[in-house]
Image: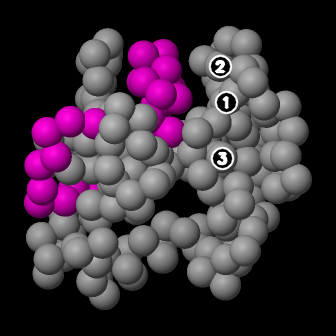
Amino acid sequence: MRKIIVLEHISLDGIIQAPGGAEEDTSGGFVGGWISSYSDEILGTLLRRQMNLPFDLLLGRTTFEIWEPYWPQHADIWSNVNIATKYVASNTRTSSNWQPSVFLGGDIAEEVANLKQQQGLDLHVWGSGNLLQTLMKHDLVDTFWLMVYPITLGAGKRLFADGTIPMRFKVTESKVTPRGVIVMNYERG
């Protein structure tokens, strides 16, 4: 059975929208790119460790479309992202040149629950705010690997939005970087 591991950059007030760049996800007039000043060697090491694990990806359409033109051109930074099977939740897309990609439509919760029951690599979820709400509502998340940044943003897409069901977790790892980012791994308790 596969695990669903959510990996997120998150502000103190719970925002996960567009952490890496101003143009990542401008919905609602949001201007992103809020993590860059917090980068340091410790955070980089922790991120690379996650990026170098074997995994498949489970992404929402918007995150996929942000990544689709970028990562094939930057394999020197993150080669595993290109070889991972990318499962994409979308009711509008059915194909991509960025392979291997599989598009999931219809009842996404049911599709993902079926994926979890299959043999294969763990499914890593980055970004994908709308998909995350569906995963949490249907109790499909096994692990949260969170990088909590010492900043409040006030508005934007939140990790724990309305409709989150009660879930118990235990901290299995935590580290504070020199710039104040708290990196925590939460496993289902």
Residue 140 located within the stretch drawn in magenta? yes
Whether 174 is drawn above or below 141: the answer is below
Location of residue 90 in the rendering, given as x and y in whole percent from the top left corner: 69, 27
- Mark nearer the viewer, 1 or 3: 3
Report the disc number at residue 89.
1
- First in residue order: circle 1 vs circle 3: 3
For label 1, count other residues whose C-alpha is less than 10 Å away and answer few (under 14), some (14-19) or many (20+): many
Does the magenta segment cover residue 86? no
Q: Determine contact: label 2, label 1, CB under 8 Å.
A: yes
Residues in magenta? 128-156
From the top left corner, tell me how far across and down residue 184 is, in percent: 26, 57
Residue 112 numbered tag = none
Q: State the separation of the CA atoms marked 2 and 1.
A: 7 Å
Which color scheme is applied?
Answer: one colour
**Residue at horizontal 63%, vertical 56%?**
67
Query: Mark 2 is on which residue type?
Result: Ile
Q: Position of residue 111 (x, y in %)?
A: 71, 21
- Amino acid on which disc 1 is placed: Ala
> Camera-side residue: 56 or 174?
56
Crowd tier of the residue under label 2, counting other residues whose Cα lies within 10 Å: few below 14, some 14–19, many 20 or above: some
Q: Which residue is mark 2?
A: 108
User: Could you say whether the residue bearing mark 3 is in a helix, strand or loop?
Assistant: helix
User: Looking at numbered disc 3 in the image, what kind of residue is underneath it?
Assistant: Glu
128 over 12 or under it: above or below:
above
The residue wearing badge 3 is 65
| Location of residue 24 with respect to 112 vertically, above or below | below
* Disc 1/disc 3 C-alpha distance (Å): 11 Å
Secondary element type, mark 2: helix
Q: Residue at x 54, y 69 (%)?
A: 51
First in residue order: circle 3 vs circle 2: 3
Camera-nearest label, 3 or 2 = 3
